[in-house]
Image (cartoon, rainbow, N blue to C red):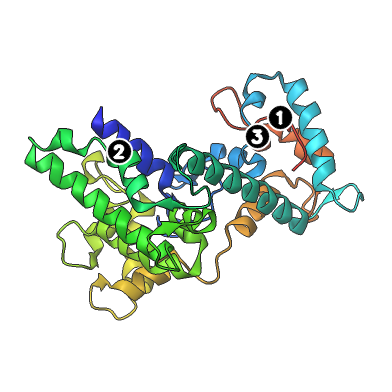
Amino acid sequence: MMKFTVVAWLSMASFVIVAGNEHGGRVKEKKLSDEDHFEGDEHNVDYDHDAFLGDEASEFGNLTPEESKERLAAIVDKIDTNGDGEITEQELIDWIKKAQSKYLEEEVQRQWEAQAPAASQDKDHISWEDYQQTTYGFIGEAEEDGAEAADYKKMIDRDRRRWDAADQDKDGKLTRHEFSTFLHPEEAEHMKDVVVKETIEDIDADGDGKISVDEYIGDMYDESEGDEPEWVQHERETFKSIRDANGDGYLDFDEVKAWIMPDDYDHSVSESQHLIHEADVNRDGVLSKEEILDKYDLFVGSQATDFGAALHDEL
């Protein structure tokens, strides 16, 4: 039960990691989805559903195709801001950014309410002590198991490092904005070093502070599954020719940062281009409502996913 509590919280506080080979497995993205962007070398359709619709519940999964198309048509009208009947790449980018900004804001608010003590007189801050008690208050129960207690201590220390980085005024407490950067450090420039450190710690199996090619591959692919698929072999070459810029056989701090936070990568642009590529039948570079409705399953999901909800309210 203790492990579940910690893991559940860490999953809520963590940032999204893109799985797959298109950007090397760990490119940090804004919160488009809890789904992996890729499954092996295949694009994950559930990611598209979440990215397109944000946090709008799960009603599309229970609708008939006709009902789904009807509700999707209403969403398309909202995306088409100039009302010309065509969805451009920029309109799609703007929609995804708006939907996901709303998702992030509401997620942060849920976590803020869960962490802020009801009896506290300070409604504008959460202290480290309150956060630690709420999240790790059961730690004493693990004291008999030295290994387990040590693991929890590592989690606490890691959270404290991220907390201190988010605490810009160094008063030991986080405002709602600071708490947002704690939950989603990939969103804030001053938190990027923390993201890089956490990534290295996650992948660096031998603890030498850098990432070898085997550790790099091991983070994406389980070698026990048998012969390596082509995309894994491609990633080995990518490690040598691109990731390992100084050619020493390892990824250091700066090389990891360049890998997971490339300056030329925008998640909303990438997702918009993918959706247009998949749905633009006449290849004119824009989407008509008909093209989107014909590919409604790409945009709104299926009964297999909890995402892709009807638009309950205006974004």
As rendered, which of 273 and 191 lies closer to the eye?
Answer: 191
Of residues 261 and 20, the one drawn nearer to the viewer in this rendering: 261
| Vertical order, 226 against 310 (above or below) | below
Dot 1 corresponds to which residue?
Answer: 310
* Closest to the observer, 169 or 73: 169
From the image, tell me which residue sits under label 2.
Answer: 6
**Residue 272 is at least partly visible in this image:** yes
Q: Closer to the N terminus: mark 2 or mark 1?
A: 2
Q: In which quadrant of the rendered view does residue 305 lie?
A: top right
Q: Which mark is residue 77?
A: none
Within 10 Å of disc 3 (Cα), the crowding (few <14, some 14-19, many 20+) is: many
Instruction: Say which amino acid is labelled 2.
Output: Val
Query: Quick one: label 3 or label 1, which is nearer the N terminus?
Result: 3
Q: Position of residue 106 (x, y in %)?
A: 59, 42
Tell us which disc is closer to us: 3 or 2. 2
Q: Is residue 27 left or right of residue 308?
A: left
Q: CA distance from mark 3 to mark 1?
A: 6 Å
Q: Residue 67: percent from the left, percent from the top?
A: 76, 21
Query: Contact, CB < 8 Å: mark 3 with mark 1?
Result: yes
Furthest residue in direction bottom, as rendered? 246
- Mark 1 residue element: loop
Q: Position of residue 238 (x, y in %)?
A: 37, 66
Residue name at image x 76 percent, y 33 percent: 72
Q: Counting residues from the N terminus, which is met first, the one under dot 3 or under dot 2?
A: 2
Which quadrant is the C terminus positioned in? top right
Quadrant of the rendered structure where residue 292 is? top right
